[in-house]
Structures are given as C-alpha cells and as structure tokens.
C-alpha cells in the first residue's frame, strides 16, 4: 500500500515540476531588447526561427520553439507576414500571440523630394517590402493609367507629398489604392477643388504648375507671388519661360545656370519653346507649393529674376523694360563676384 502512495506522490511531484517548467517556458521573460521584426511574405516557420536566431533577441530559442508548438504557431507554415515591434521583457506567450495574430505595426512613409515616378517607386521601396521595379510597373500599367485617366508623364500627380502610415508588406495595388484615397482626401479639404476651378485649372494642372513653383524658389514667402506670375502669363497666352522646365527637358539635373543653348532643347517640357504648362510635373511639389498656386497673389507681375545677392529672393516686374533692368543688375552682380 505504501508503495502505491509513494508512486502517486512521485507522479504528483513530477507533474508539478513539469507544470512549473512549462509555466516558466510560457510566462518567463525571453525578449532581451526592443526590436522590430520584419517577416517577409511567403515566409516559413523555419524562416522565422532564423530571423529570431540572427536577431539575438531571445534568451532561449528552444523554449520559443516548444511554446510555439503548443500554441500552433507555424503549423503548416501559415505565417502572417509584416512588421512587428517586439518589446523587451515579453514572454513567449506575448511574442507568439502577436506573431500568430498578424497584428503588425505600421511604418511611417514620407514621400517628397522626388523628380520622377521611378524615383517615387524607389522611395516607397526604401521603407516597405515592395520591390521598386514591381511597384513602378504597377503604377504605369495600362489598367492604372486608364483608371486615373493619366499617362506615364503625369501619373505622379496622383501622389500627394506627406507622411503616411503603411503596412510594411503592402502590395503595389494596395499602395496605389491608398494614395488614391489620400489624393481625394487632400483635394476635398480647404476648398481646394473650388479654388482650382476659380483659377481655371484642373487638379492635375495645379500640381504641374506647383512643381515649377517648387523648383523656382525655396522661399515659401515668395511662392504665391511666383504662382501669380505664371497664372498671369497663362491667362495672357505668354510663354512661361520657366528655367526649371528647361533643366528637366535637358535631363541635366545638376545644371546650375541655363544658357541659350539649353533653351533650344526640343521637348514639350521646354516652356521657352512650347506654350502652356508642360505635360507633367517636373518635380514632386510640396503641399505649400500646391497651396501657393491655389492661393496665388493677385497682381500684374509678368516677370521675375534672382536678386543680386545670395538670399534666394527674386525681383519682380510688370513689363519687359523693368525685367531687363532687374536682370542687368543680377548679371552685373554675377560678374563682380566672379560667379559663373
């Protein structure tokens, strides 16, 4: 009889020890430091183990393997992809619950300061899992261009510069669809659609003109006045003669000064040769440049040129005589300071 009691006691003791060990494996802290885990699409369970091993964030990878088996994580390699912020002090249950649920954390994506659509694709790819060339092919695909009544040269007008939250594993289609919604949201605010109609431009044309304003000045205080100059020229059928469009047409993006030979470049983007706006933006304009066009100054200026100093400011004129005087002052200053 005593032998049976001893046997039962031993069983209870062993069960208790095993339960305690199991409890520790599940609830003891295993994450040793804050980190961000990026799990690519189509990853397998073994891929996750490799990521955790290489990141060296767990103090016991074997306990993770055991508990993930108990919690059915990785069964049939059904692994949710994404970006996961992992916190120091988490136990296996917390970690596996997060990874198993696919409760990923968003990443902030800032799009600005890009010249062409391929640069924009590369910008997205620098933040997200998506491949740059794959995203580019989607953006300029026939289906997308047709949907937004665009072409390769002006599809970038769909993308409003700002900082957005995205899922790291967003697909190319999801990215385009999201930016379309942000486009609609942007233009529905602050009476922007109505303001565009008031100045006789479409939303796309506003964006294109804003791209010229963006490259003409870095001074926000001047943008509305410069926008007013170009609107005056458009209204009167005068060539825009915007130097930044010539730079874009020549593809000499490091060009510091536009010379007469550059003005002869035959391109629809050369506003010294072709009337009206260029067929697409020459740069992604900032929101301040877009709003500067929508809220352009009402004045009679038709010309502007750089002031003879290093301020980046411009001198404005209502006629060619005044403009030539301003230009001469500027050229004299260049020669005096031996600036070429």
Image: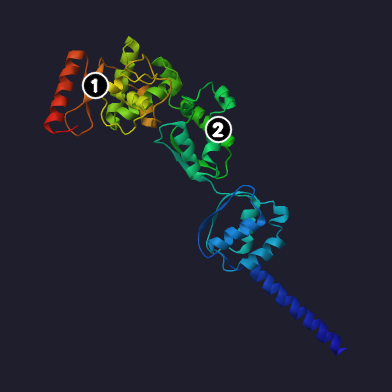
User: Quick check: 54 above or below 43?
Assistant: below
Q: CA distance from mark 2 to mark 1?
A: 40 Å
User: In the rendered image, which quarter contains the C terminus?
Assistant: top left
Crowd class of label 2 (few under 14; some 14 to 19; many from 20; radius 10 Å): some
Quarter assignment of residue 139? top right
Looking at the image, which residue is at 59% across and 26% down? 143
User: Quick check: 182 above or below 274?
Assistant: below
Say if residue 194 shows up in the picture: yes
* Residue 54 locus on image (x, y percent): 55, 61
**Side (left or right) of 70 relative to 86:** right
Say if residue 297 shows up in the picture: no
Q: How many marks?
A: 2
Residue on which the image places disc 1: 304
* Residue 211 locus on image (x, y percent): 37, 27
Looking at the image, which residue is at 14% across and 24% down? 329
Looking at the image, which residue is at 51% across and 27% down? 184
Classify mark 2: helix, strand or loop: helix
Question: In the image, which is nearer the foreground, mark 2 or mark 1?
Answer: 2
Judging from the image, the colouring scheme is rainbow
Residue on which the image places disc 2: 137
**Foreground: 260 or 271?**
260
């Amino acid at each position: 009889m005593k032998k049976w009691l001893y046997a039962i006691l031993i069983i209870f003791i062993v069960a208790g020890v095993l339960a305690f060990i199991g409890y520790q494996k599940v609830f003891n802290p295993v994450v040793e430091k804050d980190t961000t885990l990026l799990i690519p699409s189509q990853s397998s369970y073994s891929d996750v183990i490799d990521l955790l091993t290489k990141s060296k964030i767990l103090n016991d990878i074997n306990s993770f393997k055991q508990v993930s088996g108990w919690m059915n994580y990785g069964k049939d390699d059904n692994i949710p992809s994404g970006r996961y912020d992992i916190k120091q002090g988490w136990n296996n249950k917390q970690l596996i619950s997060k990874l198993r649920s696919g409760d990923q954390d968003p990443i902030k994506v800032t799009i600005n300061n890009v010249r062409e659509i391929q640069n924009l694709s590369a910008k997205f790819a620098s933040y997200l899992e998506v491949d740059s060339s794959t995203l580019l092919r989607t953006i300029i695909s026939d289906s997308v261009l047709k949907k937004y009544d665009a072409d390769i040269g002006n599809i970038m007008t769909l993308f409003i510069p700002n900082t957005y939250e995205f899922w790291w594993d967003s697909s190319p289609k999801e990215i385009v669809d999201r930016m379309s919604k942000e486009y609609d949201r942007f233009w529905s605010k602050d009476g922007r659609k109505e303001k565009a109609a008031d100045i006789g431009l479409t939303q796309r044309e506003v964006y294109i003109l804003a791209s010229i304003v963006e490259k003409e000045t870095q001074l926000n205080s001047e943008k509305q006045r410069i926008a007013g100059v170009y609107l005056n020229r458009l209204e009167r059928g005068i060539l825009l003669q915007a130097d930044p469009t010539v730079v874009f047409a020549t593809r000499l993006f490091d060009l510091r000064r536009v010379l007469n030979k550059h003005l002869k470049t035959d391109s629809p983007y050369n506003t010294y040769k072709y009337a009206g706006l260029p067929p697409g933006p020459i740069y992604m304009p900032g929101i301040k440049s877009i709003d500067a066009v929508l809220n352009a100054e009402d004045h009679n200026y038709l010309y502007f040129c750089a002031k003879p100093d290093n301020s980046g400011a411009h001198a404005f004129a209502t006629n060619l005589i005044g403009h030539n005087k301003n230009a001469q002052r500027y050229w004299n200053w260049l020669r005096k300071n031996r600036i070429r």
